[in-house]
Image (cartoon, rainbow, N blue to C red):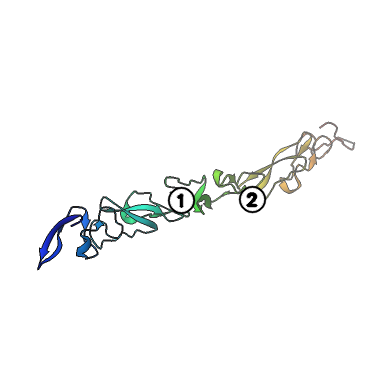
């Protein structure tokens, strides 16, 4: 008997016993122990024990089910054949595109989209203004003059340099000879302190001369 020992029953040759790793899985005495249960994916370890693994093509090695190949977009990250290719690398932030590739987002929460790291959400006060997941939520909306309160909200200050505080435009500094005397960032550094007699040299420093009309020259 192929793969085992023969026996004679009622004058007919049959299978007495199969050798280790062999099985008479088709029930046909004529071909003996025809199945290699160490490598057959339909009879792995024993007749009738078929291998079927989630998101994978199964194989049989040494009588145990194994992963032959993972379905597209899946991976066997834990090395456990019992649960097949358990990770969807298209959507899993801890294994994005491949096992061990973890997504991280500065000032925010990561996501995995089509196997690539992305920004899922930004922390309060931050935004992903450049659309680059690699640097996360890179913009502080509370302090950035180029994105003050929102992406694209640019602060401009006439006769000075713009700032941003708590998401609102401010005057960071004024050009020489100018000042923000009304504390209104909307009109910037509106006062000429080198020529304005109401604010000569500095805000609130008004010129007043006895029996004369005052002017202001060079502050």
Residue most toward the bottom? 10
SS assignment at label 1: loop
In the image, residue 34 lies at what x, y percent? 24, 58
Which sits earlier in the primary sequence, circle 2 or circle 1? 1
- The reply, left or right, for residue 219 in relation to residue 11 is right
User: Relative to residue 205, is residue 91 depicted above or below?
Assistant: below
Report the residue at 89% width, 38% height from top.
Answer: 213
Q: Contact, CB < 8 Å: mark 2 with mark 1?
A: no
Q: CA distance from mark 2 to mark 1?
A: 26 Å
Q: Residue tagged by mark 1? A: 93
- The reply, left or right, for residue 195 in relation to residue 38 is right
Residue most toward the top? 218
In the image, residue 37 lies at what x, y percent? 25, 55
Q: Residue tagged by mark 2? A: 151
In the image, residue 164 lies at what x, y percent? 65, 44
- The reply, left or right, for residue 135 in relation to residue 32 is right
Could you classify mark 1 by the number of other residues whose Cα lies within 10 Å: few (under 14), some (14-19), or many (20 or more)?
many
Image disc number at residue 185: none
Res 137 seen here: yes
Res 184 seen here: no
Could you classify mark 2 by the number of other residues whose Cα lies within 10 Å: few (under 14), some (14-19), or many (20 or more)?
some
Report the residue at 51% width, 46% height from top.
Answer: 105
Q: Quadrant of the N terminus?
A: bottom left
SS assignment at label 2: loop
Residue most toward the left? 10
Residue 47 lies in quadrant: bottom left
Q: Quadrant of the C terminus?
A: top right
Q: Nearer the viewer, mark 2 or mark 1?
A: 1
In the image, residue 67 lies at what x, y percent? 35, 52
Q: How many marks?
A: 2
């Amino acid at each position: 008997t192929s793969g085992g020992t023969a026996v004679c029953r009622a004058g007919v040759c049959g299978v007495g016993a199969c050798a280790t790793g062999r099985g008479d899985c088709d029930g046909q005495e004529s071909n003996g122990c025809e199945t290699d249960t160490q490598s057959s994916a339909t009879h792995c370890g024993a007749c009738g024990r078929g291998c079927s693994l989630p998101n994978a093509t199964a194989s049989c090695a040494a009588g145990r089910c194994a992963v032959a190949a993972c379905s597209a977009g899946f991976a066997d990250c834990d090395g456990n054949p019992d649960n097949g290719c358990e990770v969807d690398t298209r959507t899993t932030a801890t294994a994005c595109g491949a096992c061990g590739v973890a997504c991280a987002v500065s000032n925010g929460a990561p996501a995995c989209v089509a196997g690539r790291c992305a920004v899922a959400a930004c922390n309060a006060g931050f935004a992903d203004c450049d659309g680059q997941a690699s640097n996360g939520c890179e913009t502080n909306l509370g302090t950035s003059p180029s994105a003050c309160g929102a992406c694209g909200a640019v602060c401009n200050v006439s006769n000075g340099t713009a700032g941003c505080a708590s998401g609102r435009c401010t005057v960071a500094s004024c050009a020489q000879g100018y000042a923000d005397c009304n504390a209104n960032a909307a009109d910037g550094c509106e006062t000429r302190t080198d020529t304005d007699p109401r604010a000569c040299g500095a805000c609130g420093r008004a010129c007043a001369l006895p029996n004369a009309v005052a002017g202001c020259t060079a502050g």
